[in-house]
Image (tube, rainbow, N blue to C red):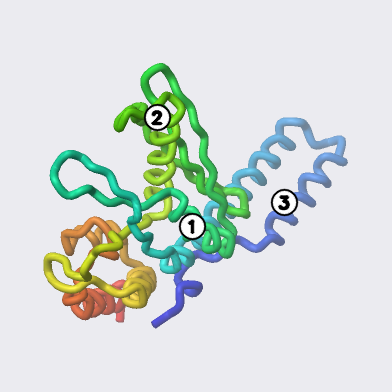
């Protein structure tokens, strides 16, 4: 199987940007070059740098995703339906993903805005090459459980961070009391999840389409009994894609 690095697009060499910079410097010193032409050269350089940063972002994201961990759901909330619902705490998510983000040159930050009724939490995933992506979720202020005003805002903010981080990174969580069984059989181990994610990326397949084929919301939810079948289909897809 080809490794991920051979599949992802390779960022444009830095020498291309350097060549544009030298061209702009020469044009700036040339009295015969008008301002409009100089501005077009600068705009061309900015577009080239932005595209290079975007390519580097997506390449690094593809390499990072197989290393992102499954987060244990240690939080509990009673939604009035009998058994309390579990969820991953933000502090657990942050602690688990931070070393992986750092390794691949990413930083995760948040912007918090609010009006009289809602809180807007925006998650921003930035890469060291300069490109970033973001997503925003509007949330009601969580006053459940007799929270005071400060606690209500804090609760909604924490939820927003969990949600936006999960959306940007395609994170998965799992209940601590999960007995390892799911509809369709045993769950995948973390090694199997890593192997499957690498197979999807290596085949050049779309993760969302893969999940739709198996009726799951996340790659990690694939029943272990379907793993061999899924990998065989990915291998076939890869051969067809490469024309072999």
151 on left or right of 28: left
Label 3, on which residue? Answer: 20
| Eye-nearest disc, 1 or 3 | 1
Residue 57 visible to the viewer: yes
Quote the CA–CA distance across marks 1 and 3: 24 Å
- Foreground: 78 or 32? 78
Give the residue displayed 25% in from the left and 59% down from the top. Answer: 209
How far apart are labels 2 and 1 at the CA level?
Answer: 36 Å
Q: Which mark is nearer the camera, 2 or 3? A: 2
- Image position, residue 242 (x, y; %): 34, 75
Residue ID at (60%, 45%): 47
Foreground label between 2 and 1: 2
What label sits on residue 58 in the rendered view?
1
Q: Residues within 10 Å of mark 1 (few under 14, many from 20)?
A: some
Of all residues, the one furthest to the top in this rendering is 116
Please, what secondary structure does the residue beneath circle 1 have? helix
Q: Earlier in the sequence, mark 1 or mark 3?
A: 3
The residue wearing badge 2 is 152
Q: Is residue 241 above or below residue 61?
A: below
Q: Secondary structure at mark 2?
A: helix
Residue 182's quadrant in the figure? Answer: bottom left
Compared to residue 186, the image places residue 163 above or below, namely: above
């Amino acid at each position: 199987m080809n490794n991920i690095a051979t599949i992802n697009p390779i960022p444009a060499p830095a020498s291309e940007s350097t060549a544009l910079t030298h061209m702009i410097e020469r044009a700036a010193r040339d009295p015969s070059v008008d301002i409009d032409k100089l501005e077009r050269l600068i705009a061309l350089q900015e577009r080239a740098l932005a595209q290079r940063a975007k390519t580097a972002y997506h390449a690094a994201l593809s390499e990072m995703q197989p290393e992102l961990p499954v987060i244990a759901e240690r939080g509990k909330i009673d939604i009035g339906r009998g058994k309390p619902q579990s969820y991953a705490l933000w502090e657990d998510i942050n602690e688990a993903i931070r070393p992986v983000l750092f390794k691949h040159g990413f930083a995760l930050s948040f912007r918090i805005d609010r009006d009289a009724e809602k809180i807007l939490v925006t998650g921003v995933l930035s890469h060291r090459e300069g490109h970033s992506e973001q997503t925003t979720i509007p949330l009601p202020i969580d006053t459940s459980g007799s929270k005071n005003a400060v606690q209500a805002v804090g609760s909604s903010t924490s939820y927003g961070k969990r949600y936006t981080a999960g959306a940007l990174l395609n994170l998965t969580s799992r209940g601590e009391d999960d007995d390892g069984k799911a509809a369709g059989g045993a769950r995948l181990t973390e090694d199997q999840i890593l192997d499957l994610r690498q197979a999807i990326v290596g085949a050049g397949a779309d993760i969302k389409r893969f999940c739709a084929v198996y009726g799951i919301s996340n790659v990690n939810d694939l029943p272990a009994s379907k793993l061999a079948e899924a990998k065989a289909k990915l291998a076939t897809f890869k051969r067809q894609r490469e024309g072999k």
